[in-house]
Amino acid sequence: MSLIAILVVLALIVAALPPLVLGGALLLGWPLRERSSVLAAELQSILMLALGLALTLAHATSGRGATDVRLPPPLDFGGYQWVPVLLVDWTSIAYLGLVCVVYPAIVRFSTPAFHREPGAARYWFLVTLLAFALLATSLAGNLDVLFVGWELVGLCSVQLIAFFRSNPRSGENSLRALVYYRACDAALLGALVWLHGSFPTAEFLRFHEDSGQSSALAVGALVLFASLAKSAQLPMSPWLHRAMEGPAASSAIFYGALSIHLGPLLLVRTAPLWMAFPTIRIACAVIGASTAVYASLVGRTRPDAKTSLAYASMAQLGVIYVELALGWHEFALLHVWAHAGLRTWQFLRSSSLIQDFQSNPLVGAQVSARLRLGVGALAIPARWERRLHLAALRLFWLDAMQWQFVARPWLALWRRLASLEDRVLAPERMRSR
Amino acid sequence: MNTPTIVPRQRARAWGLPSGALVWALIWFAPNGAPFLGAWLALSAWLWWRAGASALPRRPWFAVAALTVAPLPLAWEGCPGWLAATCLALGAGAVPFHLWLEDARRSLRRAEFALLLVAQPGVGLLHRWLDAHPHQMDASSVNALQLLFVASAVAHSGLALVREEQERVISSIVLSQSALILAGALGEEHGWVAARTLLVSASIASAVLLTILIELRRLHGTSRLSHRHALADVEPTLHAVFVACGWAFVGVPGGVAFFAEDLLFHELVHAAPLATILFVATTGFNAIAFYRVYLGTFCGTRRNGPANFAREAEGSLQASSRWLIAGLLLGTGALYVLGFLPMLAVGGH
C-alpha cells in the first residue's frame, strides 16, 4: 500500500468517525455534552487539514499525474462489483484543499454561534457528515463514489435548511430544495446506470477511452443537467434563495463555498466525456451566461444580505460554467477557490453587516440606498430599466412558471387519480359531499 | 385550518397480529403448489375475519374477492401469459389493480394493514410462480410486465405526493417499492436476488415507519399532514428513528436500499431501458414523498394545549414502551448494518 493510499484511507476514517459517533448518539437518545460535539468537529477539521496537507505533499513528491486507490468492493455479486475508487490528482487536491481550508473556519465560527442553541447536536452531526461527504466527493475516482458524496451533501443541505424546524417556511423551502436536488440527482443516477450498462468503466481516469462511445453525448447531457441544481444554474435555480432559511454558517459552507461548487467539480471530472461535443459545450455556456445575467439582475433587487449574496454566488457560478465550456478548466478551479473564499467570508459576516458598514474598514462606511437596478451604464432607457427592475423583482416569473406548468399539472394528475380511487371505493361518501 | 377529525377508538385485538404473522410465514415458507394455495386462501380468510373484528365492521368484499381469485389461474399449467400477468398484477396490487388493497386498508385495523404491507404477499406470489414456471412467459411479456410494474411504482409514488394522511403516504411508498421489487424479480439472471435485497429493506423500513406513525397517532392523534404537529421535540427518539430509517428506506447511501436499487438498475438496464428510467424517477419521487411526511409530522409550530388532540388520540397517553423503541432501533440499525455490509443481504459471494 503506497503512502498516498494510506493517507486517503486515513482521511476517510477520520472524516467518517465523528458523524458516526454523533449520529449514533442522536439515534440512541444519548445526550452528548455540547463540548464533546464541538470537540469531535474540531478534531475532524484539524485532522482533515493535516491529512489534506500531507496528501498534497505526497502527491507533489510522487512524480505521478494521478494515483488511484481501490478499496475492497462492498458489493460483489453475479459479475457486478460496486468498487470504491478514490483518485488523487491536482483536481482532487484543489477541491480537497478548499474543503480542508473552509471547513475549519466554519467550525470555528459555529462554535460560539451554536453555544446552547437548541438543536446544536443536530447541527454538529449534519456538519460533520457534510465534511465526510465533501471529502468523498473530492477524492472520488469514479462516478459511484462521487454519487454517494453528492447524495449525502444534498441530504445535509436539505436538513440544514429545515434546521429551524418550528418555522413552517423553513420546512417548505427545504422541500422545494429537495425537489430540485432529486430531479438532478435522478439525472446523475441515470448517467451512472448508463455508464455501467454501456461503457467499459465509470472511472474518471479512463473516461477519455469512453468518449468515442455513441451514447457519450447522452451521458454528457445527463451529467450537465445533474450539475445544475447543486450549482443553482437555470432553470434549476429557484431553490437557492429559499435555502437562506438555514443558519448563516451552513449557508456559508453550502451556498457560498463548497456545495454550490460541486457542479463545476462534476463537470471537470467528466470533461473527457462531454468536451468532444460542441452541443453540450454550447448548452453549458448558454446556461452559464444566462444564469449570470439573470442572477446579477435579480440579486440587485433583493432586500436582504443573504439572498443578495446567494444571487451573487449564482452569477459567479454562471461565469464559471462559461469558463468550463470554453475549456479553461484550471482557470475555472482557480475561480472556484477565489470565489469560495470571498463568499465564505461574506456569508459568515452577513449577520453583522450593519456593524460592518459602520466600523469595518474592509467594507467601508459609505453606503447609499440603491433604488434603481443600476444598469444605467448599459445605456438602457429609463423606462426599460424600470420594467427590467420589476421583472427582476418577480424573479422573471421563473418560479411561478415552473409551478404553473410543471409542478401543478403533475400534482393535479395524481390528485385526480386519488379522487377517482375514492369515487370507486366509497361512492356514497362522494355523493353526500 | 384543519378541523380535528374524530377517530373512533379501536379495541385491541390480541389475536389479529399473531394470526396475521402466521399467515405471512405460511405464504413465504409453505412449499409450492397446494400448500401455498392454502396459505393464500388463509390470507383471504384472515382479511375477512379481521375486517369483521374492527371497530367499524365493514366487509371488504372487493378485497377478499380479488385476493382469492388472484392465484387460482396461476395454478393452471396452461395459463396464458396475459392472464398470468393480470393475476400477478392483481395479487401484487399494481395500478390499476391495486384497489383491493385500498379496500382492505379501509376495513382493517391500522396495525393489521401495516402487517399486510410488510408481508408483501404479492412478491411472494410472483416468486412462487416464477419458481414453478421459469419459462412460461416469453421475453416480450416479461418486458411488458416489468414496464407495468415500474409504471405502477411511478403511480404509487405520485399518489404518495398528494395523499394527506401520513400512513397512506408511507403505504403508497411501500407499494411503490413493492412494484419495483416485482419488476426486478422478473429480471434475467440475478433479478430475484436483487429484488430480495430491496424486499428486506422495504419490509424492515416499512415496519419501522408505520409502527412509528401508528404510535404517534395513539399518543398524539396525528392523522393528517400538518405544520401543527411539530413532534420532533415532543418525541425525540421516535423522530430520530423516523428520519434515520426513512432516508435509508428511500435509497440514500448508507442504507441497504442504496445497494439494492443499484443491483436492480444493473439487472434492468439492458433488458428494459424504459423501465430503468421510470425506476430512477420513482426513487426520486419516493424521497420527496417521505420528506413531506417528515415535515408534516415532526416540523412546524405546535398548537397550544392538548384539547384538540385529546379527541383524536386513542387510548391513554402513555409513553412508548422500551421494547417498542428497542425494536424500532434494531430495525433501523439493521438497515444501516446491511448498508455497510450489503453482501449479508445479498446472500454470500
Image: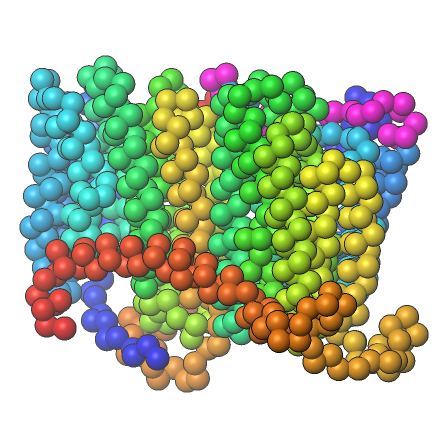
> For the image shown, how many numbered marks are present on the structure?
0
Residue at 51 percent across and 40 percent down: it is: A187
Q: Residue at x 37, y 67 (%)?
A: B225
Quadrant position of residue B323: bottom left
Name the foreground residue: B201 vs A239. Answer: A239
Q: Is residue A69 magenta?
A: yes
Q: In the rendered view of the protein, which quadrant contains the C terminus of chain A?
A: bottom left
Q: Is residue A53 left or right of residue A74?
A: right
> Left or right of B327: which side holds A147?
right
Q: Position of residue A202 (x, y in %)?
A: 60, 26
Residue A228 shows in this picture: yes
- Residue B136 picture quarter: top left
Query: Magenta segment: does it hold B62?
Result: no
Query: Which image quadrant: the N terminus of chain A?
Result: top right
Whether B192 is drawn above or below B97: the answer is: above
Name which residue lies at 55% across and 65% down.
Answer: A396
Query: Residue A352 location, x and y as percent?
Result: 79, 76
Q: State the extent of the magenta-drawn residues as a range.
A: A58-79
With respect to residue A172, does B62 lie above or below? Answer: above
Let me know if residue A21 appears in the view.
Answer: no
Given residues B180 and A332, the one toward you in this image is A332
Residue nearer the viewer, A147 or B255: A147
Quarter-of-image position of residue A199: top right
Give coordinates of residue B255: x percent, y percent: 51, 41
Seen at 62% across and 76% down, the residue is A383
Tell me the colour scheme of the image.
Answer: rainbow
A202 with respect to A367 (left or right) = left
Judge left or right: residue B242 versus residue B123: right
Query: In the image, is residue A384 above or below residue A251?
Result: below
